[in-house]
Image (tube, helix red, strand yellow):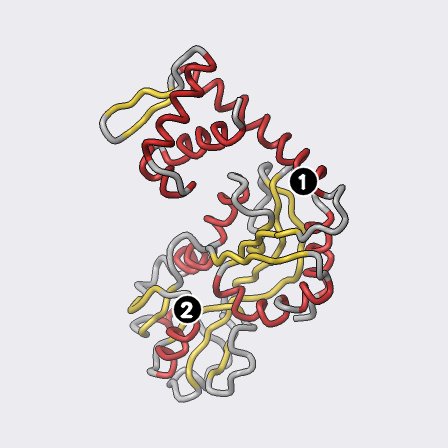
């Protein structure tokens, strides 16, 4: 049984679409279809029902997928342990992180981690917390740095540090002299909101659900946010984001929005030497 065919099948299950799955795993649609048919012939039963552009798992396909997810988690652990037998190989560690969080993490993280761990190469993916956790579950990331909101049986995590979301504005803004920002202060202010799928979007929307925020832009790109703040828009971000930029002021919120930042990995996953080295390093960073 071809291990790649098994991985292809799981990706088709995730996407529920052959075309989307083929784009993600970078093989042609006919090749992917052929691989699934080969797997079905080998097993002796159909895995998928094809209905126009959408596919559905058969009863046997659902049972097989559940068995396969358990097997692939065990196989990935075995594979990682086996690779560590080679002491001189270069290990690639795939880490996800929200763009806003990365704005003040990157300079502390890269290249300092690789300098301290020359046998490990970091590949960073910018992705919102909610999407990043999904990628961990689907084995698309080794580790993810994001918000610890609540316990989840799908992940293990370690706390890195605690921070707060605060109000940010230009020092020329009329609210710049305030000691604390109340919800009513935000009414009618041109507001920069982070995109959906992020922890920030969820907690800010929830906290100010009774105040119609005047959202003029959704962005997680700091140059864009910085430009908009200089033009008298406002936002709510981590208190560290613009701390070295004298053009902006941060003001605490009357109803605090604390945030716990942690490093996540999939539950019951074998932590390789590279993963353990990264967790130790990330916990040692001074913010």
Residue visible at 58% across and 27% down in the picture: 70
Locate residue 192 relative to residue 90 in the image: left or right.
Answer: left
Residue 185 visible to the viewer = no
Quadrant of the drawing holding the C terminus? bottom right
| Left or right of 236, for residue 212 | left
- Which residue matches tag 2? 221
Is the residue 50 above or below the residue 254 in the image? above
Q: Nearer the viewer, residue 241 or 41?
A: 41
Which image quadrant is residue 105 in?
bottom right
Frontmost of labels 1 and 2 is 1
The answer to whether residue 59 is above or below residue 133 is: above
Say above or below: 92 vs 184. Answer: above
Determine whether 63 is above or below 114 in the image.
above
Q: Give residue 215's quadrant in the image.
A: bottom left
64 on left or right of 58: right
**Residue 263, x across and y down, in percent:** 63, 53
Image position, residue 260 (x, y; %)? 60, 58
Crowd tier of the residue under label 1, counting other residues whose Cα lies within 10 Å: few below 14, some 14–19, many 20 or above: some
Q: Residue at x 53, y 25 (%)?
A: 68
At horizontal 41% and vertical 30% (from top left) the residue drawn is: 13
- SS at mark 1 in the image: helix
Q: CA distance from mark 1 to mark 2?
A: 34 Å
Horizontal side, residue 257 vs residue 197: left or right: right
Residue beneath label 1, please?
80
């Amino acid at each position: 049984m071809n291990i790649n065919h098994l991985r292809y099948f799981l990706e088709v299950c995730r996407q529920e679409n052959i075309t989307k799955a083929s784009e993600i795993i970078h093989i042609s649609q006919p090749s992917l279809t052929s691989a699934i048919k080969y797997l079905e012939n080998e097993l002796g039963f159909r895995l998928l029902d094809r209905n126009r552009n959408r596919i559905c798992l058969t009863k046997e396909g659902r049972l097989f997928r559940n068995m396969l997810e358990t097997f692939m988690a065990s196989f990935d652990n075995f594979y990682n342990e086996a690779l560590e037998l080679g002491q001189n190989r270069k290990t690639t560690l795939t880490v996800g992180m929200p763009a806003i969080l990365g704005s003040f993490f990157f300079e502390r993280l890269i290249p300092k981690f690789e300098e301290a761990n020359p046998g490990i190469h970091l590949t960073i993916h910018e992705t919102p917390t909610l999407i990043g956790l999904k990628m961990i579950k689907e084995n698309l990331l080794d580790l993810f740095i994001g918000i610890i909101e609540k316990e989840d049986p799908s992940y293990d995590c370690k706390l890195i540090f605690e921070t707060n979301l605060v109000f940010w504005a230009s020092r020329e803004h009329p609210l710049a002299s305030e000691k604390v920002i109340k919800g009513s202060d935000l009414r009618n202010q041109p507001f920069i909101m982070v995109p959906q799928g992020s922890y920030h979007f969820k907690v800010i929307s929830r906290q100010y659900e009774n105040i119609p925020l005047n959202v003029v832009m959704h962005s997680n790109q700091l140059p864009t946010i910085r430009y908009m703040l200089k033009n008298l828009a406002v936002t709510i971000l981590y208190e560290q984001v613009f701390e070295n930029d004298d053009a902006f002021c941060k003001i605490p919120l009357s109803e605090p929005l604390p945030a716990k930042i942690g490093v996540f990995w999939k539950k019951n996953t074998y932590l390789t030497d590279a993963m353990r080295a990264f967790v130790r390093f990330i916990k040692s960073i001074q913010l």
